[in-house]
């Protein structure tokens, strides 16, 4: 099982990382599982949205799958066990990306 390590460094304690494993699932599929960690010191108390971390994945030639989203509580590290699956072309690599909504409007 290949290891996955993806990092988002937004500076000033706005950080996320995913450590996990990727497994094939038949000729056109894959599954993954691991630990998603995030911290965000942005104060959202006067907004209608929360700090959120997102982990997305896809086969290299496929559209992003939509991934996993988790709400970040407080300004310390939050840890989540996550898993998912997707499709890819036979033998194709899988890409992962992680991010936090750092925009003023929650994006």
Image (cartoon, rainbow, N blue to C red):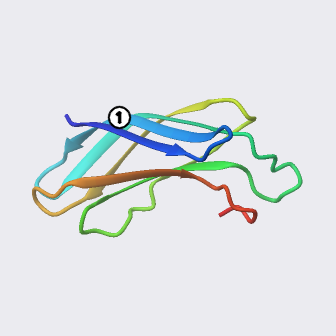
Q: Position of residue 15 (x, y in %)?
A: 58, 40
Q: Position of residue 41 (x, y in %)?
A: 74, 40
In the foreground, 52 or 40: 40
Which residue was labeled with disc 1?
20
Residue lying at the far front of the rendered structure: 11
> In this view of the protein, which residue sits in the foreground, 95 or 12?
12
Q: Measuring 74% from the left and 66% from the top, which residue is drawn there?
A: 105
Q: As drawn, is 63 to the left or to the right of 61?
A: right
Q: Quadrant of the N terminus?
A: top left
Taking the image as shown, residue 55 lies to the left or right of residue 50, namely left
Classify 10 Å Cα crowding around label 1: few (below 14), some (14-19), many (20 and above): some
Q: Residue furthest right?
A: 46
Secondary element type, mark 1: strand
Is 103 located above or below residue 72 in the figure?
below
Query: Residue drawn at (35%, 34%), measured in percent from left and top?
Result: 20
Q: Is residue 62 above or below residue 15?
A: below
Q: Position of residue 80 (x, y in %)?
A: 53, 34
* Residue 77 pos. (x, y %): 63, 30
The image quadrant that residue 34 belongs to is top left
Please state, as top left, top right, bottom left or bottom right, where the C terminus lies in the image: bottom right
Count of numbered tags: 1
- The residue depicted at 66 percent of the width and 37 percent of the height is 13
Q: Residue at x 31, y 54 (%)?
A: 95
């Amino acid at each position: 099982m290949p290891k996955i390590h993806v990092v988002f460094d937004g500076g000033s304690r706005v950080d996320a990382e995913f450590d996990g494993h990727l497994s094939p699932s038949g000729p056109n599929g894959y599954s993954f599982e691991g630990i998603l960690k995030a911290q965000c010191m942005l104060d959202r108390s006067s907004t209608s949205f929360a700090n959120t971390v997102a982990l997305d994945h896809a086969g290299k030639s496929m559209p992003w799958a939509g991934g996993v989203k988790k709400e970040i509580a407080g300004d310390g590290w939050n840890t989540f066990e996550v898993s998912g699956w997707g499709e890819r072309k036979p033998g194709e690599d899988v890409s992962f990306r992680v991010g936090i909504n750092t925009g003023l409007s929650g994006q």
